Amino acid sequence: MIFDLFFMSSKVFSSAVIGLDAEVIEVEADLGGGELGKFTVVGLPDAAISESRERVRSAIKNSNFYFPKLKVTVNLAPADLRKHGPNYDLPIAVSVLLLTKEISPAEDISKMMFVGELALSGNLRPIIGVLPIAIKAQKEKFKYLFVPEANAKEAKLASGLKVIPVRSIFELAEHLNGRKIISPSVAHEFDFSSPPSAFDMSHVKGQEHVKRAVEIAAAGGHNVLMSGAPGSGKTLIARTLPSILPDLSLGEALEVTKIYSVAGKLPQSAALITSRPFRSPHHTASGVALIGGGAWPKPGEISLAHRGILFLDEFGEFPRAVLENLRQPLEDGVIHVSRAAGNLSFPAKFMLIAAMNPCPCGFLGDKERDCSCSASQILGYKRGVSGPILDRIDMHIEVPRIKFEKLTSESYGETSSEIKARVDAAREVQGKRFKDLPFITNSEMSSDAVRKFCPVDPVSVNLLRGAVDQLHLSARSYFRVLKLARTVADLAGENRILMPHLAEALQYRPKLEY
Ligand SMILES: Nc1ncnc2c1ncn2[C@@H]1O[C@H](COP(=O)(O)OP(=O)(O)OP(=O)(O)O)[C@@H](O)[C@H]1O
Ligand SMILES: [Mg+2]
């Protein structure tokens, strides 16, 4: 009798986020063959999934649906893929409602994917990682993706997919049974122009050479270390830097949004991140917070800064061991983390902007004020940052204290939008140069690309040779100088790298004292 009323098994599709990508998960439910009233979930579930049994049971009952008295077994396949988080509440509930025929879908359920966390009331709660899931659903040719209403805007970034925003399992059942149809989400228009910033370059008095340097850095995506006395404007300039960076492209915005989505840091109001990230972790941040990782690896600050700025203020105060972690991502633009859950990589192409005082008291090298540090204090302070890290920073800039007259002068320098226009033009040149290559800025060029795009004339070769010998440049520095010179030439609208471009690039290399 009961067997006529119920199906013995059902299957729906869901998705698991692994790193920045998603996999299709089959959620199978089976009825009978065990202790009455038992409800088990198998397939390597973590604690959240085990708890999901209780949520699903309550949500189904509180939505006035029947929960079977026979044993219910739910299997999440493939079993060897570790699953995490509450995303599976919704597909588990749907698979149970299919068994009890509370849901009799009018359309083919194998073309639908379900994700969402349930509240005990049967309402849906937003989940993290919806964008990679939507991209996967689209790739695997699913027709519908059912997501919590709050995630629908984000899911709709995968164009071509029909995203159904779900508020409760009751409404979902009504929809699937063809009684009350929920209309699919519509795609949104996004505005990529930079929002007005509280910081503008015209507010920075004096420091012309620093502004010039950050303009070059912004144009070519180069790393910068600012060093100077307290209160000279290092932090101010770093915070102003985003206002001269080019707007994000749609492709970049999707890359960035995926990272924020998986990290659970996507603001509810913003489905798509449309402005460049600016991350400024404190120097007490742990290695995992900076680099990423954890039992279920999540992107760290360096990935959250992808396509934007990682600002490390008080650079010398970061523990050396923490900074050492930056070596590989600074070189490769990607971070690999291996954990029990598997080997994952997260993109980390960021501009490193670091600021520090030259010594503990901050006045080493100041023309008018004596430094009160002992030689060993200075040495200890500098040892905090390792040579290999400094070698990866293209531009070392001294930021001196500014004179009273400059600070109080009424004259305003160039505004950020004037500088940004030049940066945009230089980026356009780079865009054309790297049309068929996987680079966006000069700083990303491989050695091969440097050879191809940074030819140096014979006179400049001599200058370069002298510099390599005198400044003891490493092979890496040599390539970095050429990339920087390429950006200086691009800003000047020059096809060839000429002597003045090279000379300016060389001037940003660290002096021998490091
Ligand atoms: N060049 C400048 N033009 C205008 N204001 C400035 C300038 N330099 C500093 N200031 C003012 O001084 C404040 C402190 O500057 P900021 O925090 O950038 O100094 P800093 O170099 O980072 O110092 P520290 O080494 O102590 O961190 C700024 O908020 C700003 O109001
Ligand atoms: Mg500061």
Image (spheres, rainbow, N blue to C red):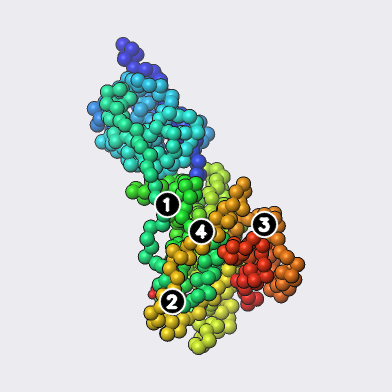
Task: Check disc 2: other Cα within 10 Å, few if <14, some if 14-19, many if 20+.
Answer: many
Q: Is mark 2 within 8 Å of ligand 1?
A: yes
Tell me which amino acid carries mark 1. Answer: Phe
Query: Which label's residue is closer to the chain start, 3 or 4?
Result: 4
| Callout 1 secondary element | loop
The residue located at (37%, 26%) in the rendering is 95
Q: Is mark 4 within 8 Å of ligand 1?
A: no
Is 158 located above or below residue 347 in the figure? above
Q: Is residue 81 left or right of residue 269?
A: right
| Callout 3 secondary element | helix
Q: Are marks 3 and 2 in contact (CB under 8 Å)?
A: no
Q: Which residue matches tag 3?
A: 453
Point out the frontmost of discs 1 and 4. Answer: 4
Q: Are marks 3 and 4 in contact (CB under 8 Å)?
A: no
The residue located at (42%, 85%) in the rendering is 405
Q: Which residue matches tag 4?
A: 424
Query: Which label's residue is closer to the chain start, 1 or 3?
Result: 1
Q: Which residue matches tag 1?
A: 192
Q: In the picture, residue 388 is in which quadrant?
A: bottom right
Residue 169: where, in percent of width, then height?
Answer: 30, 31
Query: Which label's residue is closer to the chain start, 2 or 1?
Result: 1
Name the quadrant of the C terminus.
bottom right
| Callout 4 secondary element | helix
Q: CA distance from mark 3 to mark 2?
A: 36 Å
Q: CA distance from mark 1 to mark 3?
A: 30 Å
Q: In the picture, residue 36 is in which quadrant?
A: top left
Residue 239: where, in percent of width, then height?
Answer: 43, 66
Tell me which amino acid carries mark 4. Answer: Asp
Tally of numbered tags = 4
